[in-house]
Amino acid sequence: MNKPLEISIDEWKEIMRIPEIRESWGIEDEAPEEFADMVYGVKFKFTSGSPGYVGDLYILQGDVLTGDAPFILLRRKGVLELAY
């Protein structure tokens, strides 16, 4: 299925724990709902067209288009992390 899915509040909490995300958005005591209002975020149930990744894929973009690439996160072995 390649249709975008909404990110749940629990998933936003998980995303907010990633140090690079916290630093990039200056997260301190924001509630997940507040953070979700500041970020364009989408989730996909991703299946690679060739042997490779299968699982959750998140794409996050701030509300300012700076030319920087959006954040891409993958779930590997149950842990959400940045895709490099």
Image (tube, rainbow, N blue to C red):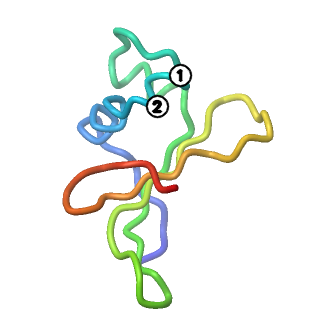
Tags 2 and 1 in contact by the CB under 8 Å rule?
Answer: yes
Q: Position of residue 8 (x, y in %)?
A: 30, 42
Residue ID at (62%, 32%)? 62
Out of 72 and 12, give the one closest to the viewer. Answer: 72
Q: Which residue is mark 1?
A: 25
Q: How many marks?
A: 2
Q: Which residue is mark 2?
A: 21
Residue ID at (42%, 19%)? 34
Q: Position of residue 45 (x, y in %)?
A: 37, 68
Residue ID at (29%, 42%)? 11
| Residue 40: quarter of image | top right
Q: Position of residue 9 (x, y in %)?
A: 28, 35
For this orientation, the residue located farthest to the bottom is 50
56 up-or-down from 60: above or below? below
Residue ID at (28%, 37%)? 14
Give amino acid for label 2: Ile
Q: Is residue 72 left or right of residue 76?
A: right
Between the C-alphas of marks 2 and 1, the distance is: 6 Å
